[in-house]
Amino acid sequence: MLGQIIAKHQIDAIIHFAASVVVPDSVANPLGYYRNNTVNSRTLIEAAVKGGVKNLIFSSTAAVYGNPQTIPVGEDAPTLPISPYGASKLMTEMMLRDVSQAHPLRHTILRYFNVAGADPKLRTGQSTPTATHLIKVAVQAACGLRDRMQVFGTDYPTPDGTCIRDYIHVSDLVRAHSDALRYLRGGGASLTLNCGYGRGFSVFEVIDAVKRIANVDFPVEHAPRRAGDPAQIIADGTRARRALGWQPRFDDLAMIVAHALEWEQKLKQHKA
């Protein structure tokens, strides 16, 4: 089926987004994650090679780094994932690099940091009602769609004890993909790039931002750590800026939260 689609539409580039992405779920169901994220990616890559596809952009993750020793973390840092999710993505990265050595398939691997926000024009946004992403959960609580939210771990070796993450606006991530596609179609060599801003915010800082911007308080419960969560991870995004000419436009936590909140309010109105 994939081969027929590639041939029929004369596809020259594939952007591979599909994956299972919940870290704790990967710890509980590693074989499911290796099947969906690694085995199925192999099937896609094989079809791309057989169909003569020239370019492939792969959605990878900062989870391939595990608990990095250096912050911010660059693309050449050791890849030591601490969850099956991160390992399943790293395996696909390895396959792509090997395939690109053996076949004329060039690739760009984009390692996402924490994607959040919504389209500023509210045409689209994250719609999964049971999403586990922090900003999504917090704005749902602010909108009354959850009666409380949980913080998983307050004893990490960070200033306030909660995990620190680099949050990237989804619209900037979209632009990174279009820049990567233009780069590959222009003859660029295969490469791996971080997609993040280079600044981090703790879980408590994000929750405070949501409460402030929504002007709403909501209960926050402290819960034990989740398996597979690193304490802190922040991107060194220098290479993406240099290689692609990528320039973020929404590098602001308050803006990311505001767009996510507006999108959640729109979803709530449609359900009313």
Image: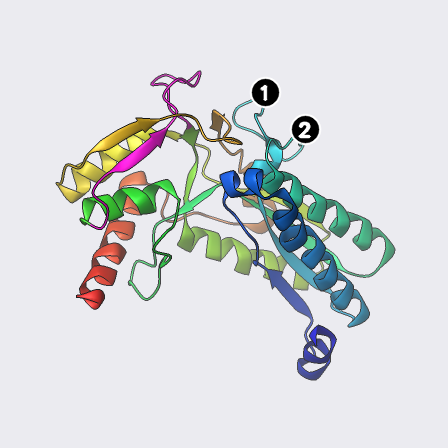
Tags 2 and 1 touching, CB below 8 Å = yes
Q: Does dot 1 land on a helix, a strand or a loop?
A: loop
The residue at which mark 1 appears reads as 69
Viewed as shown, does residue 226 lie left or right of 209? right
| Most common secondary structure along the magenta stretch | loop
In percent of the image, x 28 and y 37: which residue is there?
149
Amino acid carrying mark 1 in the image: Gln
Viewed as shown, does residue 15 lie left or right of 216? right
Where is the C terminus found, in terms of image quarters?
bottom left
| Residue 126 is a magenta residue | no
Say which label, 2 or 1, has the lower sequence index: 1
- Picture quarter containing residue 88? top right
In percent of the image, x 18 and y 41: which residue is there?
213
Q: Depth check: give the residue in front, 260 or 81.
A: 81
* In the depicted structure, whether residue 106 falls above or below residue 51: above
Viewed as shown, does residue 98 lie left or right of 246? right
Give percent across and percent down for residue 264: 25, 55
Q: Does dot 2 land on a helix, a strand or a loop?
A: loop
Q: Depth check: give the residue in front, 170 or 224.
A: 224
Q: Which mark is residue 202?
A: none
Residue 176 seen anywhere in this rendered image of the structure: yes
CA distance for labels 2 and 1? 9 Å
Give percent across and percent down for residue 140: 25, 48
* In the depicted structure, whether residue 201 falls above or below residue 159: below
Give percent across and percent down for residue 62: 55, 38
Mark 2 Cα shell of 10 Å, populated few (<14), some (14-19), many (≥20): some
In percent of the image, x 67 and y 64: which residue is there?
185
Give percent across and percent down for residue 249: 38, 49
| Residue 157 is a magenta residue | yes
Residue 188 seen anywhere in this rendered image of the structure: no
The residue at which mark 2 appears reads as 78
Range of magenta residues: 145-163
